[in-house]
Amino acid sequence: MELLFWRNAQRTPRIVVLVSLTLIILGLIPLYHPFNLYAADVIVVDHSSKTPQPYQTKDQKIKIAEEDCDVFIGDWVPNPDGPYYTNTTCWAIHEHQYCMKYGRPDTDFLRWRWKPKGCDLPIFNPYQFLDMMRNKSMAFIGDSVGRNQMQSLICLLSRVEYPIDISYDDDQNFKRWKYTTYNFTLAAYWSPFLVTVKESDPDGPSRTGLFNLYLDEPDVKWITQIEQFDYLILNSAHWFTRCSVYYEKNQIIGCRYCGLPNVTDLPINYGYQKALKTTLEAINRLKNYKGVTFLRTIAPSHFEGGEWNKGGNCIRRRPFRSNETSLDGLCLEFYMTQVEEFKVASDEGKKRGKRFRLLDMTQAMLLRPDGHPSRYGHWPNENVVLYNDCVHWCLPGPIDSWSDFLLHMLKLEGRRALEESLQLK
């Protein structure tokens, strides 16, 4: 039988064999290539009583914007397909960002997407994201706007899978979740100043507290925990407007609006620049950290008609065009500090095998005065500190687009990491 088969095979034209093998290989490639197609009917593991909604997209192949295109420069364009989740499909919406619950009458703010100038930025695909994050981990470190971003990401991913809580304790400031199907861990570390802080007076001169900031000491609550993570997303800035006393080497060097005798009042950006430098230098010194650090730039607030505690509000109902406004004042100072300190840390990081990326959300969010909760983050008769919230973002809302940018940067990461490793050689 073996001899007969071999003789028959000898008579088969060699070209037919080659064509057949080629067709077989081409047929198998889509089954095993992880970045080809992501079908919307993949198996979903439900960790909640609520069932994730199926996600449909016209083209689910990974697309990367042109390399010479700056995806952070552009305008908001209508998106009739939004939003991609609701409060009934996502449990992670923080009460104060659930704008529709508290009577926000308009919904147009939900139906915009970011369009870079000269290229396109695909809408976030949760299947692609989770597949790329398989067996990986990501931590959000910073203030409540960073937590706002993480909650948005959880809601977008809820169309595929709900995570389970694997937090070490009940402290809501330090949370961990796991997407079991993908072995993907997501964590949050509350550290609004990023450096060591002690609240010396819960009231303070402006009734928002008085804080002692140790500008040369990174916050041990997160710096001692991050070497295990594959991705870090850092943010800070807003809390540095609060009354603070600045310490270096455990000595008072000045303050901001502290009202203490014989203590020099320093510029508001002084403390932030020092704290951010300390944070990035500490990451560069970590011997076992091999991950990617994203520094997310400031998302401007939009108080008009007064400051946050003096009647200021955000009542606009459409995005700005890029030629209708510009960054200025304190937000511009914070942003320039972030860009400058990022550049210093990135250059030093390349020498140490560390990777820093700038998640530059400032221009896009400057154009979205319509996306804040305003007075629709609580009931009218509630006594809250931030009555008109023009700092955080409605969920769903414009902040969901941050995941579009994040996924785009993750797609680029493999290429950039290879280029940087070749430069080191």
Image (tube, grey):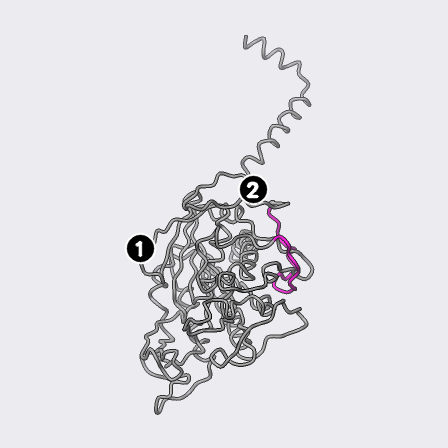
* Spatial CA span between label 2 and label 1: 33 Å
**Magenta span main SS:** loop
Instruction: Indicate the position of residue 335 as horizontal and vertical percent values.
Output: 53, 73
Q: Furthest-left residue in view?
A: 169
> Can you give x and y, in whole percent of width and height, for residue 349 in the image?
47, 63
- Between residues 412 and 375, which one lies in front from this camera angle? 375
- Which residue is label 2 attached to? 38
Judged left or right of residue 194, residue 405 is: right
Query: Which span is picked out in magenta?
Result: 62-81
Query: Identity of the amino acid at label 1?
Result: Tyr
Position of 269 relative to 419 (above/below): below
Q: Residue under label 1, please give it.
A: 168
Image location (x, y in percent) of residue 153: 49, 55
For residue 102: magenta? no
- Quadrant where the N terminus lies? top right
Q: Secondary structure at mark 1?
A: loop
**Residue drawn at x 39%, y 52% as measured from the top left:** 177
What crowding class fits label 1: few (fewer than 14 Cα within 10 Å), some (14-19), or many (20 or more)? few
Where 7 falls versus 18 (above or below)? above
Residue positioned 61% across, 68% down in the render = 317
Q: Secondary structure at mark 2?
A: loop
Residue 396 in the image: state x and y as whole percent: 53, 58
Q: Is residue 109 visible?
A: yes
Residue closest to the far bottom: 262
Amino acid type, callout 2: Tyr
